[in-house]
Amino acid sequence: MVSVPHFPFSMDESLSPVSGNPSVSDAAAVNWTDLRAKLYTGTENTRLQAIADLSKAGTEGLNLLQEFLVQSRDYSPTWIEGRVYQVLRQADRPAVKAFLNQQFPMGIVPLHSAAQIDYTALQQVLADQDFQAADRLTLEKLCELAGPAAVRRKWLYFSEVDRFPVEDLRTINLLWLVHSDGRFGYSVQRQLWLGLNRDWDTLWPRIGWRNGKKWTRYPQEFIWDLSAPKGHLPLSNQLRGVQVINALLNHPAWQS
């Protein structure tokens, strides 16, 4: 007999097993104990493969992915949770949509803000993997953090970045990390930059912002999906020099 994954909470109608074909493959042949162990404790590659396998395993597989998200909610989400969330969003099953609406109506990243900034729209476009819209919205939110003058001019002074609350910059960065398989975000850019001995001229081609002596042109030459180089997004305007991105990558938010 197949051991069906169970939820750690009381199942109501919105969390009941999804209807329809039970599986892309034979559900009875799935080793649920093994898949569950891989999802919770495997290496990154093993966990990714488990997520892919469960996404094709019908009702029981989707239920186990829902259980995983619920049990992970007390911890800061990683891009593994982001991948599970993406799979569930794409499941196109009413019960799964009801589960997400009930359990994660704002998304899976807690939207903390010391400045009372609303990051709901940013989470939505990132969850949709509309990275071009997310990049524009990120700049808007940074300008909101900087104050009314920055909102009017639509760009930042580096001195304004220094005053950003740690909590807000971490929220923005975590949103990018979780919804990009860990490929995008200021902390990713910082890690690459530090690994290159803080050499900007070496960083630009590494993250796809320059090719030789030619700067990448906005927006048509940037890559707005996960095939982009690691650290490609979010963007910073280099026409005004490196002071803004230097301030972002040196912000206290990245200090443990």
Image (cartoon, helix red, strand yellow):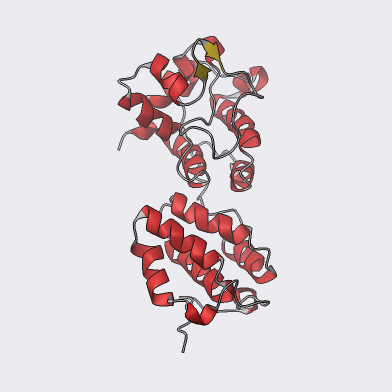
121 over 139 or under it: above or below: below
Query: Residue 13 versus residue 166: which sits nearer the camera?
Result: 13
18 over 222 or under it: above or below: below
Question: In which quadrant is the C terminus drawn?
Answer: top left
Question: Where is residue 220 drawn, in percent x and y?
Answer: 66, 24
Query: Residue 93 versus residue 22: which sits nearer the camera?
Result: 22
**Residue pictured at 39% horizontal, 54% vertical:** 45
Residue 19: quarter of image: bottom right
Is residue 156 in view from this perspective?
Answer: yes
Residue 126: quarter of image: top right
Question: Where is residue 75 drawn, in percent x and y?
Answer: 40, 56
**Residue pictured at 38% horizontal, 33% vertical:** 253
Question: Where is residue 103 drawn, in percent x and y?
Answer: 57, 64
Is residue 73 in view from this perspective?
Answer: no
**Residue pictured at 60% horizontal, 71% vertical:** 24
34 sits to left or right of 106: left
189 over 81 or under it: above or below: above
23 sits to left or right of 31: right
